[in-house]
């Protein structure tokens, strides 16, 4: 089966008839029929049964269609990649970040960045890490900001900052000082999601199935703010949502590595490198301030 056969076969499977397939391909109905018959002759088996004027896919056709769908998805990804490579001039920056970072860190840094690059065009999106990697591999992003270095072929990472984890509670049993994980009330525990933070917590303690599970650090902190329970988050995300009277240091030495991720075969352009340096400068300043306030409050 060659590419012309595949094109006709896929169109008929999608459209359900030769007439609609011909419209989709902008060719005549006889041309579609002839192409299908030629494909069947080369394959040695039927792709469609002709029943009462309708085309009914055979078992072989259904199996081939599953594979054809993945082929067309790859073609779509290829086309998107080609378009993205053409649509990104030097002054355009497209990047993604985790949802919690999109609420404070990225808007603040981007505001500072645009003051330095008044002619720049910025496209920012928020996704979880797996989705950010997918967009990087499709060349839809220049880089991504995520809370872990990725050990994945073709992806490189640059550390921006080591951000400590902290305990969040509006009504803690311990009123001051560092909190140990084994002292956290399991009945009030808010699960912060199955990502790098949760995996790090599991190295020290495994919490049983909880009543409340969330998928962003910001949402977990908002539940704590409303007295719905307790959780653990990174210091930066917590400080943007809660007063320091609800944030406590942990006895366990746990930090998250905030990183810039990018395609190894596409080194960061100067505009991306400048953004990276600005993020690092901003984070260092803010983390110093937050750490001082954290230990003054406790």
Image (spheres, rainbow, N blue to C red):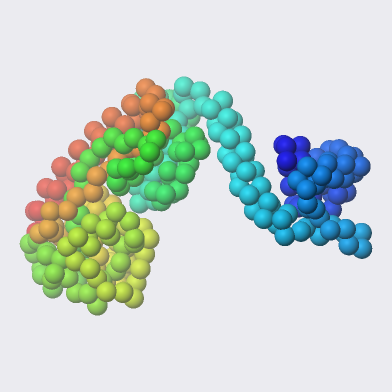
Q: Residue furthest bottom?
A: 187
User: Would you say residue 24 is visible in this rendering?
Assistant: no
In this rendered view, identify the residue nearer to me: 127 or 28: 28
Which residue of the protein is positioned furthest toward the front in this rendering?
44
Q: Position of residue 194 (x, y in %)?
A: 34, 60
Quadrant of image for the C terminus: bottom left
Please provide percent x and percent y for residue 266: 42, 27
Left or right of 35: which side holds 157?
left
- Find residue 90 and report its horizontal and vertical position in percent: 46, 22
Q: Residue 214 is drawn in which quadrant?
A: bottom left
On screen, residue 181 versus residue 71, left or right, reads left
Q: How far across and how far down the image is residue 6, in percent?
A: 73, 42
* Residue occupying the point 13% across, 69% down: 182
How many marks the image carries: the answer is 0
- Residue 285 visible, this orientation: yes
Residue at 19% in and 74% down: 185
- Using residue 177 as the reference point, say whether residue 224 is left or right of it: right
Is residue 185 depicted above or below 86 in this figure?
A: below
Which of the 4 image quarters holds residue 206? bottom left
Residue 252 higher or lower than 26, as above or below? below
User: What's the residue at 64%, 43% (across, down)?
Assistant: 72
Left or right: 42 as drawn, with respect to 290: right
- Quadrant holding the N terminus: top right
At a point 88% along the width and 48% down the height, the residue shown is: 19
Task: Give above or below for 43 relative to 223.
Answer: above
Q: Nearer the viewer, residue 232 or 65?
A: 65
């Amino acid at each position: 089966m060659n590419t012309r056969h595949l094109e006709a076969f896929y169109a008929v499977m999608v459209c359900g008839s030769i007439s609609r397939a011909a419209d989709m391909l902008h060719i005549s109905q006889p041309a579609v029929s002839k192409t299908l018959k030629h494909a069947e002759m080369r394959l040695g088996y039927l792709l469609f049964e002709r029943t009462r004027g309708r085309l009914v896919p055979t078992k072989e056709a259904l199996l081939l269609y599953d594979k054809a769908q993945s082929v067309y998805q790859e073609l779509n990804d290829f086309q998107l990649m080609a378009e993205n490579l053409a649509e990104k001039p030097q002054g355009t920056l497209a990047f993604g970040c985790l949802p919690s970072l999109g609420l404070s860190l990225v808007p603040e840094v981007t505001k500072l960045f645009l003051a330095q690059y008044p002619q720049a065009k910025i496209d920012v999106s928020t996704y979880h890490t797996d989705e950010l990697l997918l967009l990087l591999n499709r060349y839809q992003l220049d880089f991504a900001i995520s809370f872990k270095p990725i050990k994945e072929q073709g992806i490189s990472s640059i550390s921006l900052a080591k951000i400590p984890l902290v305990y969040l509670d509006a009504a803690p049993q311990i009123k001051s000082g560092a909190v140990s994980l084994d002292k956290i009330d399991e009945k009030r525990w808010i699960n912060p999601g199955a990502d790098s933070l949760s995996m790090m917590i599991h190295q020290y303690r495994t919490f049983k199935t909880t009543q409340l599970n969330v998928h962003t650090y910001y949402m977990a902190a908002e539940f704590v703010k409303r007295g719905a329970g307790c959780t653990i988050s990174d210091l930066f995300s917590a400080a943007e949502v809660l007063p320091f009277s609800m944030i406590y240091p942990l006895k366990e030495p746990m930090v998250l590595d905030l990183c810039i991720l990018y395609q190894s075969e596409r080194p960061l352009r100067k505009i991306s490198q400048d953004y990276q340096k600005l993020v690092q400068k901003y984070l260092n300043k803010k983390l110093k301030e937050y750490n001082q306030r954290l230990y003054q409050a406790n």
